[in-house]
Amino acid sequence: MLSNFFGNDHFQKSFQQVQKSIVNNKDDTNQLLSEKELKLIRFISYLTYMQTTTTTNITWNGWEKNYDGPQLDLGSIRYTLAHIGYTAAALAYRTPNYRELAIKILKDSIERMLNIKVWGYIDHYWKNVHTFPDPVCDENIMYSGHLLQLLTLYESLSGDFTYDIDGFDFIWDKDNDRITKIHYNTTKLAYAIYYQMNEESSAGVSCEPE
């Protein structure tokens, strides 16, 4: 039980704080961002939508340290992009006036996540799997799960369901391999993850081959 771990005093104090906030009519969404928070938002804006980003042309200014890595550890681009997107979603909740900005950051994060530079590491693990180069249908939850979360947050905040209606493509054109285009949409991605969870006794999806 969580109460045994934290102690009853922890939950009692938390409840009292919530109760006090309700009585005083306080709401986190009314709080202004600090100077440090504003600088952070400016920085992640620079890393994302403030640069040129189209399906065929993505610039990575400021990403050099992550960009040149093997994308196999915690410094991988996918993790940074995912948490930039989560920060944007939290920004939209915390400060509704910044909703449009949050949507721009989320959309750009998604476009970058779909770039082969982010998911091209799959040949390190799944080169000999029959579904290769599909990056989401077999394991790799630390990419597919983050991508799905970004997509659903974007759709929820923007009301734009283009990624679900028109879909998106994973384009494999690495090295001298044959160019392969794999089409998905938000719903298909969700089902791909659900299917793997349903097939696994633990209801989990592996991030790497066992």
Image (cartoon, rainbow, N blue to C red):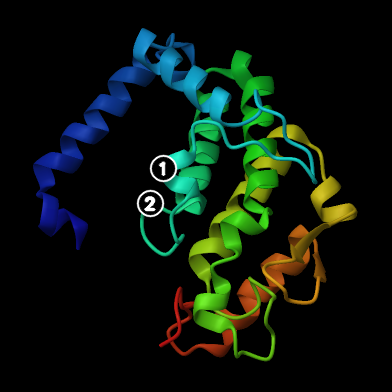
Residue shown at the point (56%, 23%) measured from the top left: 46
Amino acid carrying mark 1 in the image: Lys
Residue shown at the point (23%, 34%) measured from the top left: 14
Instruction: Using the numbered discs, state the Cα–Cα distance from disc 1 to disc 2 in whole angstroms.
Output: 9 Å
Residue shown at the point (73%, 35%) measured from the top left: 53
Q: Is residue 57 above or below residue 43?
A: below
**Residue contact between numbered discs 1 and 2, judged by CB atoms under 8 Å:** yes
Q: Secondary structure at mark 1?
A: helix
When asked about the image quadrant of residue 194, the answer is bottom right
Q: Which mark is residue 106?
A: none
Q: Which residue is mark 2?
A: 75
Q: Which mark is residue 65?
A: 1
Q: Decide which of 194, 110 is in the foreground and name it.
A: 110
Amino acid carrying mark 2 in the image: Gly
Q: Residue 49: image x %, image y %?
A: 66, 28
* Quadrant containing the N terminus in the rendered view: bottom left
Pointer 2: residues within 10 angstroms few (<14), some, or many (20+)? some
